Image (cartoon, helix red, strand yellow):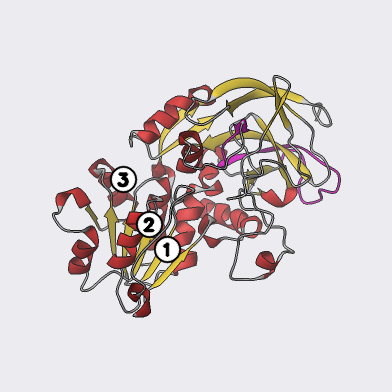
Amino acid sequence: MATAGKVIKCKAAVCWGPKQPLSIEEIEVAPPKAHEVRIKIVATGVCRSDEHVLSGSISDMKFPVILGHEAAGIVESVGEGVTDLQPGDKVIPLFVPQCGKCRCCVNPDSNVCYKNDIGKYNGVLLDNTSRFTCKGKPIHHFVGTSTFTEYTVVDDIAVAKIHQDAPLEKVCLIGCAFSTGYGSAVNVAKVKPGSTCAVFGLGGVGLSVVIGCKVAGASRIIAVDLNSEKFAKALESGATECINPKDYDCPIHEVLTKMTDDGVDYAFEVIGNTGVMTSALLSSHFGYGKTVIVGIAPSNATLAFDPLCLLTGRVLTGAVFGGWKSKDSVPKLVDDYMNKKFEFEGLITHKFPFEKINEAFELLCKGESIRTVLSF
């Protein structure tokens, strides 16, 4: 392409600091170095994890930064040594990379590649530098992806080539929300046919958990949220019933254990609230219930509960990105979507041009959207 090897000037939403609106700026995006890929972003979703940075609840973030981690796009150019991708390929950036060589990558039970930037927030690519500048200042990357920009650069272990016919404005959700939720059910919990599930939190990820429980054959899927307006979408996604903790005088775990003959088989916390994590754990069956933590809690949060909760046989676990090994699994998930194994278009409640990104975050914070997809 004509732009290969050159700096590209484009629009990006720069986060100059917490508790500030995103600012649409002209930035410069440097060409990819060895084992890097420059991507033209076509569509990007607005996720609660990005909002955690904006609100300041992730305290160790480096600013200024370009957020965004759920997207799909087209390869613009590749750096030296990249052999599995070429310009024109449709791709999804991966906020959990897969180097294929580290201890986690070679272990079939883990997907958290050592080279990920979650929780570390170094804000740079693997060579410890940034490809973004704005007004003469370097801008940090976000978890190796940074998709709130017309062009981004990622390490080649953090991008998956997908089906050339895939609709990018839909499959962008496989970059985070759908894969995270669906995988938490089918991959991490390994929900069994005929089982009972409770899903706490009905945002884009929570509803994807519901879809996963349904695909896995759960007989009861109880959706739990403080916002009853989300119940219609939950039922549409596969929930069998919905409950609002505000409608009861007793703790919600007591409500669920009464409803399910001593507790659900599987519980999922998809909010990032430590009190709800404990409620989810206590709502699971004391002898064999499995609880999966999916939500990201604030940086300083701690979890406290009576160890007897686990001693009787409950299991408490967590997972990032639904436990999927990203580079291997994302192309297959896109193929499964194309083959109609599941459907998640209903999660996309709003479609905006990129310039309306702050409006998208307002809708998210007010609980008025499930997923907003921004297009360039």
For this rendering, which residue is in front, 290 or 316? 316
Name the residue beneath numbered marker 2.
269
Q: State the residue at coordinates (35%, 77%).
A: 288
Whole-Å distance between the Cαs marked 1 and 3? Answer: 22 Å
Tell me the SS state at disc 2: strand
> Hey, which quadrant is residue 67 in on the image?
top right
Decide if residue 244 is in sight here.
Answer: no
For this rendering, which residue is in front, 271 or 197? 271
Question: Main SS type for the magenta part?
Answer: loop
Q: State the residue at coordinates (78%, 45%).
A: 127
Q: Residue 168, percent across and down? A: 57, 39
Mark found first going from the N terminus, 1 or 2: 2
Residue 82 part of the magenta segment = yes
Q: Is residue 312 above or below residue 205?
A: below
Tell me the SS state at disc 3: helix
Name the residue beneath numbered marker 3.
233
Seen in the image, is 244 located left or right of residue 175? left
Whole-Å distance between the Cαs marked 3 and 2? Answer: 18 Å
Name the residue beneath numbered marker 1.
292
Mark found first going from the N terminus, 1 or 3: 3
Give the residues drawn in magenta, as a range. 64-88
Q: Nearer the viewer, mark 1 or mark 3?
A: 1
For the C terminus, the image quarter is top right
Tell me the SS state at disc 1: strand
Mark found first going from the N terminus, 3 or 2: 3
Q: Is residue 23 above or below residue 264?
A: above
Whole-Å distance between the Cαs marked 1 and 2? Answer: 6 Å
For the N terminus, the image quarter is top right
